[in-house]
Amino acid sequence: MSGLSLDALRDCLEGAIPALVATCSADGTPNVSYVSQVHYVDGEHVALSFQFFNKTRHNVLENPHATLLVANPATAALYRFAVEYLRTETGGPLFEGMKAKLAGIASHTGMAGVFHLKGADVYRVRSIERVAGSVCHAPLPHRNLLAAVRRAGPALASARDLGALFEQALDALERDFGVRHAMILIADESGESLYTVASRGYPQSGIGSEIRCGDGVIGVAARERAAIRINHSTAEYCYGRALRESASQSGDDVLPTEIPFPGLAAPGSQLAVPIVHGARLAGVLFVEDPEAGRFNYDDEDALAALAAQLAAGIQLLQGAETDEDGGSAKDTALTPRGRALVIRRYAANDSVFLDDDYLIKGVAGAIFWKLVGDHVREGRSEFTNRELRLDPAIRLPALSENLEARLILLERRLAERGGDVRIEKTGRGRFRLLVRRPLELAEVPAAH
């Protein structure tokens, strides 16, 4: 490749300057056209967006050899790629990543009703040469992302529990990566949806908000186990739209129990990176910015490295939480006073309300109902993770690894609701229920 590497030229593939593709039919007739997206696949391959069955598409099916002309938007340098068509992918991580980017490009250029990805055409890059011409100096990068990843490592490793791990990750994003808007979501036990456990940079935390796998930037990243990056605002991948559609299809007969996502009203750039340990999806790390074009391939790589550190930390700390001993004990440090707090549970989906204020549902709701029930009936305040795992009333899935994350979610939701009932950790695998008002429990049975 004449000393030039595809890895070093990824900035040319961001789409800021449209690329040109030159092809030739079997009879030698040439054709040159613009291509909406040239996507970096790896150090030897790129993918072109297949949107229309046009002359370019016809030519590469007859003659797989083509030439790409790409430009570096920072320096105006031009590069010529000699490429060879290999295959077309119509599903999977590569296709979904390009589809999301194309949606952003289409929205940005007013072509939202025209641009629809039919496939990702994968090409092998045979050679790269620089085209002679004037070149300006590239601006210096805003920050060294490799150094940012290096600094984040010890910070995450110092966390003693999952709550601290999530906060250390958000601190690192803001301090070292310059990311002001971020959230961490954990996959639920079914693997079909995710819930927010930590966020940074929003007026409301959105703790407990949920989104299904496959919906929006976050859901697609979870489903495909691949980073999804969009550098222009697009309604098609808006998490708010996906959440509204999810709520409309839920069919619940109880009071509204959807917690709004904390995202930006008009994001210019979005990047969702899966948190994966082995073959298991642990969650998604999501960042966004009001500025278009904020995240590039280097940001994607750096956030993927941070997500890998998060995955390792989650696995380690979840394992540590199972090493608990001993039973429970009564605690009378607080004397509840004042008007009774009515805690209402809907058995249909374990949704729980504090007076008329929605708190939580699902597994976290079942956990909370067990805690307040034991407190009212037996005067208990001290609990362990182990007993929750063994309690059949909570209906935890077999081999559930998300109990600690659910407890963090519950702890933070209770703190946001004013502190009449709180949870605080008292040791590894142990926590205390703090109650400041008398509790009155009311259960609404499921309709038959």
Image (cartoon, helix red, strand yellow):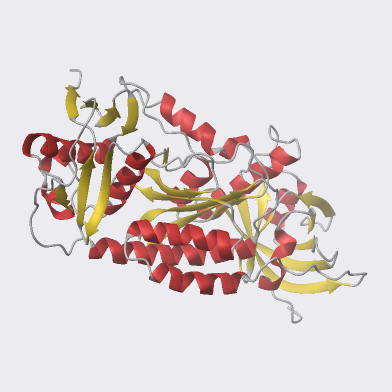
Q: Eyeballing the image, is 148 above or below 51? A: below
Query: Is 68 or 246 nearer to us in this picture?
Result: 246
Q: Eyeballing the image, is 331 above or below 420? A: below
Q: Is residue 30 visible?
A: yes
Residue 345: x %, y % from top left: 22, 27
**Quarter of the image containing the N terminus?**
bottom right
Query: Is 405 or 274 nearer to us in this picture?
Result: 405
**Horizontal side, residue 209 vs residue 348: left or right:** right
Q: Is residue 188 visible?
A: no
Residue at position x 35%, y 40% in the image: 413
> For residue 72, which quarter of the picture?
bottom right
**Horizontal side, residue 278 vs residue 266: left or right:** left
Residue 366: x %, y % from top left: 21, 37
**Quarter of the image containing the C terminus?**
top left
Residue 324: x %, y % from top left: 15, 62
- Give the total of numbered labels: 0
Query: Is 128 or 175 nearer to us in this picture?
Result: 175
Query: Is 49 or 284 nearer to us in this picture?
Result: 284
**Horizontal side, residue 420 vs residue 250: left or right:** left
Residue at position x 40%, y 26% in the image: 249
> For residue 281, which quarter of the picture?
bottom left
Looking at the image, the residue that sits furthest to the bottom is 3
Q: Eyeballing the image, is 231 above or below 301? A: above
Residue 157: x %, y % from top left: 39, 71
**Horizontal side, residue 43 vs residue 376: left or right:** right
